[in-house]
């Protein structure tokens, strides 16, 4: 009986690993197709590092210079990155593959953001989602719990700083944000569905204010996930709804990176007995 439980647990963890690795793999293939890999931006003049110590550390090691010294090296790196996620998907129990894949993904994220000239958000979710796979299976559940807490705290503090900084005190602030965010989009797509909705919300600040407050409340609600598993499935739905709204209203395409975090919340607490 104990052996059957153990085999079931191992199978369940391996299956979830394969799902997550495959999800990241598909995202990377899409990034290659849409021109978002290092060999697409290798010659960008930007070297943005901000105040992030990780960026400065990799820059001091000259990793960014090495991987973007020419297009061929950048393309080889992109191929190696994708290849490791293929291997991790095929052999999910090989922890070494998970660790190397995660390191390569971090290199890609940091250098891609440097070359873009600002921090993008579509890759941060991958880092939290992959965290449990870097530890041996006896530590899988604790590391999963840690990743879930980090995920919930990141959403909570996003809402907290909106509250703390007083963005909600300006009734028409979100209308101004929409005007700035969609200036180019509204010019080139004046009759699109999104343009019509954005124009309406700009003209009716009360609607925009309602959406802004709703988003802030959704983010603040993630604090419950730090202390309890009871609301995990609701928080998973909140992640999806939040990023659907984020994409439609703010034109921020972070689905692949951030909605992957849902798995941290819907993973069953106890493996099923075969």
Image: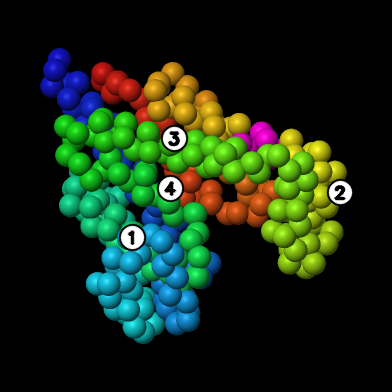
231 relative to 168 in the view: left or right: left
C-alpha distance separating marks 2 and 1: 42 Å
C-alpha distance separating marks 4 and 1: 19 Å
Q: Earlier in the sequence, mark 3 or mark 1?
A: 1
Q: In front of the other: label 3 or label 1?
A: 1
Q: Residue at x 36, y 49 (%)?
A: 127
C-alpha distance separating marks 4 and 3: 11 Å
The reply to whether the magenta stretch includes residue 116 is no
Element type at mark 1: helix
Say above or below: 194 vs 51.
above
Q: Which mark is residue 152?
A: 3
Q: For mark 4, what is the residue? A: 125
Question: What range of the chain is rendered magenta?
Answer: 211-216
Whether residues under marks 3 and 1 lie with C-beta atoms below 8 angstroms apart, the answer is no
C-alpha distance separating marks 3 and 2: 34 Å
- Residue toward you, 67 or 119: 119
Residue count near mark 2 (Cα–Cα under 10 Å), binned few <14, some 14–19, many ≥20: few
Residue count near mark 1 (Cα–Cα under 10 Å), binned few <14, some 14–19, many ≥20: few
- Residue toward you, 154 or 6: 154
Q: In front of the other: label 4 or label 3?
A: 3
Q: Earlier in the sequence, mark 4 or mark 1?
A: 1
Q: For mark 2, what is the residue? A: 203
Q: For mark 1, what is the residue? A: 53
């Amino acid at each position: 009986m104990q052996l059957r439980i153990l085999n079931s647990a191992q199978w369940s963890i391996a299956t979830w690993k394969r799902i997550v690795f495959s999800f990241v793999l598909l995202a990377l293939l899409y990034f290659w197709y849409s021109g978002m890999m290092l060999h697409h931006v290798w010659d960008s003049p930007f070297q943005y590092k901000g105040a992030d110590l990780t960026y400065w550390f990799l820059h001091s090691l000259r990793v960014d210079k090495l991987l973007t010294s020419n297009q061929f090296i950048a393309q080889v790196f992109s191929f190696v990155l994708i290849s490791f996620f293929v291997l991790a998907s095929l052999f999910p129990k090989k922890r070494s593959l998970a660790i190397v894949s995660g390191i390569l993904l971090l290199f890609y994220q940091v250098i891609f953001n440097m070359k873009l000239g600002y921090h993008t958000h579509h890759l941060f979710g991958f880092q939290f989602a992959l965290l449990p796979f870097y530890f041996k299976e006896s530590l899988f559940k604790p590391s999963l719990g840690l990743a879930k807490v980090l995920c919930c705290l990141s959403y909570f503090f996003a809402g907290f700083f909106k509250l703390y900084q007083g963005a909600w005190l300006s009734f028409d602030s979100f209308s101004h944000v929409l005007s700035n965010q969609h200036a180019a989009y509204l010019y080139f797509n004046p009759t699109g569905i999104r343009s019509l909705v954005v124009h309406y919300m700009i003209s009716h600040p009360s609607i925009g204010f309602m959406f802004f407050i709703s988003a802030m409340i959704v983010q603040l609600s993630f604090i419950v996930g730090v202390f309890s598993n009871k609301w995990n499935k609701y928080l998973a739905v909140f992640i999806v709804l939040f990023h659907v709204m984020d994409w439609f209203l703010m034109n921020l395409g972070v689905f692949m990176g951030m909605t992957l975090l849902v798995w941290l919340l819907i993973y069953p607490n106890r493996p099923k007995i075969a």
